[in-house]
C-alpha cells in the first residue's frame, strides 16, 4: 500500500512556500508511529492523526502498535465510534477508557454500564473522586472532562506508555468533541499517545488540533490496483496469478476500501472460489468470480434471472424494490398469501437475488438488482403500488416515515381522507418516538406529514396542524434549526391559526437564544405577542415605566371590574403565554438590549394588573426595580426587589415550575449592590451560580459568574486570585456554550492582565491577548452597547488607578455615548464618579455651569454613600478632597484626603487606599511638599502591590523614576 503522509512541522508556513513532503509507503508510516511510541515511552505526549477513506488501513496501522506497547509494559485501549451504534458517541468514547479497569483495578461491576457510569465507577475505585456518586453530576461537561483528564494522567503514570486509539472521530457529536478538545488543548499528559483515525482531516476541529505543537498528521491514500494485488499476495496469501486477475475487480467494486475487500474475499472463500483450478477451468473460474463480485458486466445475468421469475413473483420483487435495499416480508402479505410470499422469496433466494437476514427481513444482494427491479415496474401502476405500500407500511411503526413518503408519491391514488388518516397515525408514532429520545426521527416524520397534506393542512385540519406544530417544535433542539422554523413561519398561509403562529414564534425565540441572535430573539417575541393580540414597543422610555409603577393601584382598580369581562374574550391561557414570552426576554434584555428593558417590564406589569399574578411575572419586578434605581427611587426599588424575592421563594415552596435562582441572581447583581457591601454578596452569588448550574440553566449561571467577577474587582479582592477565577469562568462559559458572554469575560481578563502583569505599555490599554483588535472591531460593527461601555469603563478605572486622568476621561467620553446600556446599575454610578474625580483634577469644572454639574455628582455620591458606605463612602470623600484641593484652602483639602484614606483603611480596601494616597501625594507634589509627596506615592505603590496590581506599581515607578528614591526595597 502506498500512502501520502504529511508531517505537521511546516503547517504554520503559507501554502505557497510550504515545503512538499515526500510520499511515504505504509511501512514508512508504521515506522513513524513506532518512533512516536518511543518518544511517548520516554515521557513525551503525542497526538497522531491518521486520515484516509474508510478501509485505507488506518485501524490496521494503529493495531500494529500493540506488540511494541506490550513489550514496553504499557497498554493500548481503543474507542470505536460506530455510526450505527445505539449508544451515543460520547458513551462510545468513554467506554474505551473503561478498558483501563483490567490493568488498574478489578473488573467493573457491570459490563452493561454506560460510558459515564463506567467512568464514574472507575474514578471512584482509583480514588480520583472524593465525593459519593450521588453528589457528582457527570452531566456537567466540565466535571466529565476533568475526570477523564485525571484518569488518563493516573493511568499513564502506571502504564508507561499508554496508547488511546479513537477510531471514527468523524462520528463524534459536540459533547464528545468537547471532552476530546479539552484533553488535547488543555492537558499535556506524559507517557500518553492519543491516536485519532479520521476520514476527513479538514474538519474545523481537526484543523485546529493539527496546529498543536505535538501533533503529527499522516494522510493515507486509497489502494491502487498494484497496492491491492500486493495486499492480496502478502497479507491474504492469495495465489499471485489469481491476485493479478481479481485485483482489478476489487479495485473497481471497492475503490480501495479494505473492509469491503475483506467482505468480498470472505464471500469468494465461502463459495470455494479461491482454491486452485486446472488451466482448462481458469476462464470459467474468472466468470464465477466476476458474477460473485457483482461487477457491472454481471447485470445481464441479473436481468435474465429476473425474467425467469413468474409474473406474480416479479410483482412481489418490484414491490419490495420500492421499499429499499432491506425490506420486511410482512409488507408483501397484502399482495400474496403467506405461502406464496414464502415460495417466491425462496425462488428469488435460489436465483441469488436476495438473502435472508433474520426473522422476516430480507435484503437485495446487490444494489443493481434494486435498480433493475424498479425499472421493470410498469409505470401506469406505480401510483397504485405506492398507495398499497403506504397502507401496509403504516401498520408498522418503524416504517412510518417510509409509509408517508409512499403516500405522497401515490398522488391522486390516495383520497384526502386517507391522507389525514395517515397523518393522524404519523402524529401518534412521532409522539412515541419523541418520548423514546429520538427527536430527529420524529421531526422527519412530522415534516413528511406537512409535505403530504400541503396547504390544506392549515385550512381544513386546524386541530391536527396545531398538534403537529407542537410536536415538531418540541423536536427542534439545535441552534442551526432556527432557519427551518423561520422558513415554515414565512410560508404559512394567512388562514393558519393563531396558536400555530404562537408556537412557531416561541420556538424561534428559544432557538434564537441558543444562537445568540438577539435581534431574532426580540423579533420572535414580537411575533409571538402579535399572535396573542398583544404588542411590544421596544422604545418605551423609563419615565413611562415609572408612571406604570406610580399608577399601579389605579390600574388595579381600573381593570378589576373589567377582569371578568376580559376573561371571556381573552383566555387566561393566552395571557400566561404572553407572560411566558416576556419572561424569557429578561436575561438577554438586561445583558444584550438594555434599552428594551423598560418596554418588556411595562408590558409585563400591565398584564399582571389586568389579569392577576402568574409565575412568569416575578422577574418583571426586578426589571422595574432596576428602572427605579435609574430614576433614583432607591427605597421603592429595594422594596420591590424584596417583594420579588419573597414571591420567588413562595413559588418554589408551592412547587411551581419556576427557576428559583433567576430572581436572586438578578437582584444580587443589579439591585443589592446599592445597599449591601459587595463582600457580603459574593458568597450568595457563588451559591446561586452553582444552583443554576445544577438545574441546567447555564445562561443565568453565566450571568452570575459575570456579576461575581465584577463585584470582586470593585470590592478590591486579591487580583491574582481573581485572575485565576476569571480564567475558570471563561472555560465554563465555553463548555456551556454561553458565547454571548465571552466579550464581557474577555474584557475582564484583559483588564486584570493589565493590572497584574508588568509591561512597557500603559496598563489601561484594553486590547491584547484576551480582547484582540479583531474582537473589538466586531463589537463596534454590531454596536454592542453593553460590552463597549463595559470595556471603556474598565479602561477608565485602570487609568484612574494609574493617576492618568486624561486617558481616563478620553475612555469615559467614548463609553458615555452608550451609558444607557448600564443605566440604573452601579456601573453608571461608577462612570459619574470617575468623570467627576478626573475632570476635577484636570480643571474641567472651573466654569460656573461646569461646577453645577460637578456639584450634582457630589450630591449623588453623598446619597449613594448613605445607602452603601462600604462601596461609596471612600469614593465620596475622595471626590470631596479633590474638590477642596481645587476650589478651597490647603487645610480643608488635607483634612478631606486624610478622611478618604482613613475610610479606605477601615474597609481594608487596598485599591481605594492606594488611589487615595496616590492622589494626596500628587496634590502635595503640586504644593511643593516633596518629602511628604514621596512618602505617600511610595505608600500607594506598596498598597497596589499588596492588592496584586503589579502592573500599576510598575507604571508608577517608571513614571516617577528617581523621585521615589531612596529605593522602597
Image (cartoon, rainbow, N blue to C red):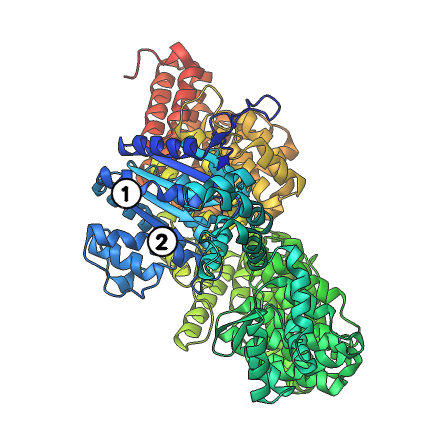
Taking the spot 41% from the left edge, 25% from the top edge, the residue there is 951
Res. 555 in view: no
| 670 relative to 946 in the view: left or right | right
Camera-side mark, 1 or 2: 1
User: 249 or 384: which is nearer to us?
Assistant: 249
Q: Dot 2 corresponds to which residue?
A: 144
Q: Residues within 10 Å of mark 2 (few under 14, many from 20)?
A: some
**Position in image of residue 489 (x %, y %):** 72, 66
Residue bearing the label numbered 1: 153
Q: Position of residue 264 (x, y in %)?
A: 50, 55
Mark 1 vs mark 2: which is more N-terminal?
2
Relative vertical location of residue 779 with respect to residue 266 in this rendering, above or below: above
Quadrant of res 272: bottom left
Tag shown at residue 401: none
Do labels 1 and 2 touch, CB within 8 Å? Answer: no
- Give the residue at the far front of this rendering: 280
Q: Disc 1 and disc 2: Cα gap in Å? A: 14 Å
Q: Which quadrant of the structure image shows residue 775?
A: top right
Q: Position of residue 198 (x, y in %)?
A: 48, 45
* Number of marks in picture: 2
Q: Which residue is at 56% across, 88% downward?
A: 339
Q: Viewer-proximal residue, 79 or 571?
A: 79
Q: Nearer the viewer, residue 502 or 865?
A: 502
SS assignment at label 1:
helix
**Residue 969 picture location, percent across and down:** 27, 17
Q: Secondary structure at mark 2?
A: helix
Tell me if mark 1 has few (under 14), some (14-19) or many (20+) residues whose alpha carbon lies within 10 angstroms of its own.
some
Q: Nearer the viewer, residue 705 or 548?
A: 705
Whether residue 641 appears in this view of the structure is yes
Q: Is residue 502 above or below residue 341?
A: above
In the displayed structure, 875 sits above or below 547; it is above
Amino acid at each position: 500500500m502506498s500512502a501520502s503522509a504529511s508531517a505537521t512541522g511546516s503547517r504554520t508556513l503559507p501554502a505557497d512556500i510550504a515545503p512538499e513532503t515526500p510520499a511515504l509507503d505504509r511501512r514508512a508510516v508504521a515506522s513513524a508511529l513506532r518512533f512516536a511510541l518511543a518518544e511517548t515511552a520516554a515521557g513525551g505526549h503525542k497526538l497522531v492523526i491518521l486520515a484516509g477513506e474508510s478501509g485505507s488501513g488506518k485501524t490496521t496501522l494503529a493495531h500494529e502498535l500493540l506488540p511494541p506497547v506490550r513489550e514496553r509494559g504499557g497498554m493500548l485501549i481503543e474507542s470505536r465510534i460506530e455510526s450505527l451504534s445505539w449508544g451515543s458517541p460520547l458513551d462510545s468514547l468513554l467506554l474505551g477508557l473503561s478498558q483501563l479497569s483490567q490493568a488498574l483495578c478489578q473488573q467493573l461491576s457491570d459490563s452493561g454500564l454506560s460510558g459515564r457510569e463506567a467512568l464514574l465507577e472507575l474514578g471512584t475505585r482509583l480514588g480520583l473522586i472524593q465525593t459519593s456518586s450521588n453528589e457528582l453530576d457527570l452531566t456537567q461537561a466540565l466535571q466529565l472532562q476533568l475526570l477523564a483528564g485525571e484518569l488518563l494522567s493516573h493511568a499513564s503514570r502506571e502504564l508507561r506508555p499508554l496508547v488511546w486509539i479513537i477510531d471514527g472521530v468523524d462520528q463524534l457529536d459536540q459533547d464528545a468533541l468537547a471532552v476530546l478538545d479539552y484533553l488535547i488543548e488543555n492537558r499535556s499528559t506524559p507517557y500518553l499517545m492519543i491516536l485519532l483515525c479520521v476520514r476527513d482531516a479538514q474538519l474545523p476541529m481537526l484543523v485546529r488540533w493539527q496546529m498543536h505543537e505535538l501533533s503529527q498528521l499522516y494522510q493515507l491514500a486509497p489502494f491502487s490496483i498494484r497496492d491491492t494485488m500486493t495486499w492480496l499476495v502478502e497479507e491474504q496469501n492469495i495465489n499471485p496469478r489469481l491476485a493479478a486477475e481479481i485485483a482489478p475487480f476489487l479495485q473497481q467494486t471497492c475503490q480501495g476500501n479494505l473492509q469491503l475487500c475483506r467482505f468480498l474475499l470472505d464471500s469468494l472463500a465461502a463459495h470455494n472460489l479461491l482454491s486452485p483450478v486446472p488451466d482448462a477451468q481458469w476462464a470459467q473460474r474468472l466468470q464465477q468470480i466476476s458474477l460473485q463480485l457483482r461487477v457491472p458486466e454481471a447485470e445481464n445475468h441479473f436481468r435474465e434471472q429476473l425474467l425467469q421469475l413468474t409474473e406474480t413473483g416479479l410483482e412481489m420483487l418490484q414491490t419490495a424494490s420500492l421499499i429499499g435495499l432491506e425490506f420486511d416480508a410482512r409488507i408483501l402479505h397484502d399482495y400474496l398469501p403467506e405461502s406464496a410470499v414464502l415460495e417466491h422469496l425462496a425462488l428469488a433466494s435460489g436465483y441469488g437475488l436476495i438473502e435472508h437476514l433474520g426473522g422476516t427481513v430480507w435484503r437485495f444482494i446487490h444494489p443493481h438488482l434494486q435498480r433493475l427491479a424498479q425499472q421493470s415496474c410498469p409505470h401506469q401502476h406505480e401510483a397504485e403500488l405506492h398507495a398499497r405500500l403506504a397502507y401496509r407500511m403504516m401498520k408498522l411503526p418503524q416504517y412510518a416515515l417510509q409509509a408517508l413518503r409512499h403516500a405522497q408519491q401515490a398522488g391522486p391514488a390516495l383520497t384526502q381522507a386517507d391522507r389525514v388518516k395517515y397523518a393522524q397515525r404519523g402524529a401518534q408514532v412521532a409522539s412515541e418516538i419523541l418520548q423514546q429520545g429520538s427527536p430527529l426521527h420524529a421531526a422527519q416524520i412530522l415534516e413528511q406529514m406537512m409535505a403530504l397534506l400541503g396547504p390544506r393542512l392549515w385550512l381544513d385540519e386546524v386541530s391536527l396542524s396545531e398538534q403537529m406544530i407542537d410536536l415538531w417544535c418540541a423536536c427542534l433542539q439545535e441552534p442551526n434549526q432556527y432557519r427551518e422554523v423561520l422558513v415554515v413561519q414565512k410560508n404559512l398561509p394567512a388562514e393558519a391559526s393563531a396558536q400555530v403562529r404562537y408556537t412557531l414564534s416561541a420556538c424561534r425565540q428559544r432557538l434564537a437564544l441558543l444562537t445568540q441572535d438577539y435581534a431574532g430573539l426580540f423579533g420572535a417575541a414580537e411575533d409571538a405577542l402579535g399572535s396573542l393580540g398583544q404588542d411590544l414597543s421596544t422604545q418605551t422610555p423609563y419615565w413611562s415605566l415609572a408612571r406604570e409603577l406610580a399608577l399601579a393601584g389605579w390600574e388595579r382598580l381600573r381593570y378589576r371590574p373589567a377582569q371578568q369581562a376580559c376573561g371571556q374574550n381573552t383566555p387566561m391561557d393566552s395571557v400566561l403565554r404572553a407572560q411566558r414570552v416576556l419572561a424569557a426576554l429578561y436575561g438577554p434584555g438586561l445583558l444584550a438590549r438594555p434599552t428594551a428593558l423598560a418596554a418588556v417590564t411595562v408590558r409585563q406589569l400591565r398584564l399582571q394588573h389586568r389579569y392577576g399574578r402568574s409565575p412568569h411575572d416575578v422577574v418583571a419586578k426586578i426589571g422595574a426595580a432596576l428602572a427605579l434605581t435609574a430614576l433614583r427611587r432607591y427605597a421603592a426599588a429595594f422594596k420591590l426587589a424584596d417583594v420579588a424575592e419573597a414571591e420567588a421563594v413562595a413559588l418554589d415552596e408551592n412547587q411551581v415550575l419556576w427557576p428559583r435562582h433567576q430572581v436572586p441572581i438578578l437582584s444580587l447583581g443589579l439591585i443589592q449592590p446599592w445597599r449591601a457591601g459587595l463582600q457580603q454578596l459574593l458568597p450568595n452569588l457563588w451559591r446561586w451560580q452553582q444552583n443554576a448550574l445544577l438545574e441546567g440553566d447555564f445562561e443565568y449561571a453565566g450571568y452570575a459568574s459575570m456579576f461575581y467577577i465584577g463585584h470582586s474587582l470593585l470590592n478590591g479582592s486579591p487580583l491574582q486570585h481573581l485572575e485565576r477565577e476569571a480564567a475558570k469562568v471563561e472555560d465554563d462559559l465555553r463548555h456551556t456554550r454561553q458565547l454571548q458572554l465571552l466579550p464581557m469575560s474577555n474584557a475582564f481578563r484583559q483588564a486584570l492582565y493589565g493590572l497584574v502583569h508588568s509591561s512597557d505599555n500603559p496598563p489601561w490599554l484594553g486590547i491584547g491577548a484576551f480582547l484582540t483588535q479583531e474582537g473589538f472591531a466586531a463589537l463596534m460593527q454590531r454596536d454592542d452597547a453593553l460590552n463597549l461601555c463595559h470595556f471603556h469603563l474598565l479602561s477608565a478605572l485602570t487609568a484612574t488607578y494609574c493617576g492618568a486622568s486624561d486617558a481616563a476621561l478620553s475612555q469615559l467620553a467614548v463609553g458615555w455615548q452608550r451609558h444607557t446600556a448600564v443605566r440604573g446599575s452601579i456601573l453608571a454610578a461608577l462612570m459619574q464618579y470617575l468623570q467627576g474625580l478626573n475632570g476635577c483634577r484636570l480643571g474641567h469644572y472651573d466654569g460656573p455651569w461646569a461646577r453645577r454639574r460637578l456639584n450634582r455628582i457630589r450630591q449623588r455620591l453623598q446619597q449613594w454613600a448613605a445607602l452603601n458606605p462600604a462601596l461609596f463612602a471612600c469614593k465620596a470623600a475622595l471626590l470631596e478632597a479633590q474638590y477642596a484641593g481645587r476650589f478651597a484652602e490647603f487645610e480643608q483639602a488635607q483634612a478631606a484626603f486624610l478622611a478618604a484614606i482613613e475610610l479606605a483603611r477601615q474597609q481594608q480596601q487596598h485599591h481605594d487606599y492606594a488611589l487615595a494616597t496616590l492622589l494626596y501625594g500628587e496634590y502635595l507634589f503640586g504644593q511643593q511638599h516633596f518629602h511628604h509627596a514621596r512618602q505617600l506615592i511610595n505608600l500607594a505603590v506598596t498598597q497596589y502591590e499588596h492588592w496584586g496590581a503589579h502592573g500599576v506599581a510598575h507604571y508608577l515607578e517608571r513614571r516617577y523614576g528617581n523621585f521615589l528614591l531612596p529605593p522602597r526595597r
